[in-house]
Amino acid sequence: MTAIPARRLNHAVLFVSDIDRSVEFWTSALDMEVVSQIPQAHAAFLRLTHGSNHHDLGLFGLGPDVRKPPGAGIGLYHLAWQVNTVDELADARQTLIDLDAYAGESSHGATKSIYGKDPDGNEFEVMWMIPLNEWGELANSATTERLDLAAEVERWTGIPTA
């Protein structure tokens, strides 16, 4: 068997309760634009305005009576959206706070992460990756530590992602 040579996540699709509310959230939180809406399917496809993909996120509305069961379940845990600079990560933190969607933050060594939740409780990550030549021993490890975002911005401001 040959493994599939995937490069990165191309797009994600979420089931949501209210399609209009979710479109408003995602276009506000991640500066996305609506590529296409299919009202009869309660669907919308969104693209990051700073990206080059056809669409990055698909949303399918299930209606207001559908709710995620309490507690963790089998299935999607979160999506990770990569930004180009640590400065954009700091801006993302404030955007999520402004949207009352901020859910935490952490350093995973080579990546620095902010977490949010959409209106249906779907968790997502906004992350920045330190330059590849700085990975060192981080190349083969994954940690979860407290993120000192101010210190990361001071150290890495203006440096593009790996």
Image (spheres, grey):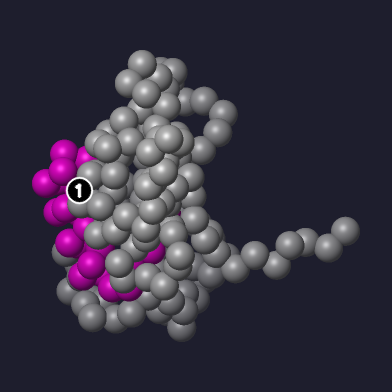
Query: In the rendered structure, which amino acid carries the disc numbered 1?
Result: Leu
Give the vertical position of 106 relative to 39 (above or below).
Answer: below
Query: For the C terminus, which image quadrant?
Result: bottom left
Q: Percent position (x, y) of residue 11?
A: 49, 56
Residue 123 in magenta stretch: no
Residue at left offset 70%, top offset 67%: 5
Can residue 65 be seen? Answer: yes
Q: Quadrant of residue 154?
A: bottom left
Residue at left offset 43%, top offset 35%: 40
Residue at left offset 43%, top offset 58%: 56
Q: Quadrant of residue 19?
A: top left
Residue at left offset 38%, top offset 38%: 39
Extent of the magenta region = 79-103
Residue nearest the observer in this picture, 112 or 27:
27
Query: For the N terminus, which image quadrant?
Result: bottom right
In this view, the residue farthest toward the right is 1
Q: Percent position (x, y) of residue 13?
A: 48, 45
Q: Which residue is mark 1?
A: 96
Q: Is residue 55 left or right of residue 85?
A: right
Residue 101 in magenta stretch: yes
Give the vertical position of 110 relative to 46 (above or below).
Answer: below
Give the vertical position of 158 relative to 54 (above or below).
Answer: below
Dot 1 crowding, Cα within 10 Å, few <14, some 14–19, many 20+: many
Q: Percent position (x, y) of residue 61?
A: 40, 32
Q: Quadrant of residue 49?
A: bottom left
Badge 1 element: helix
Can residue 145 be seen? Answer: no
Q: Is residue 83 left or right of residue 138?
A: left
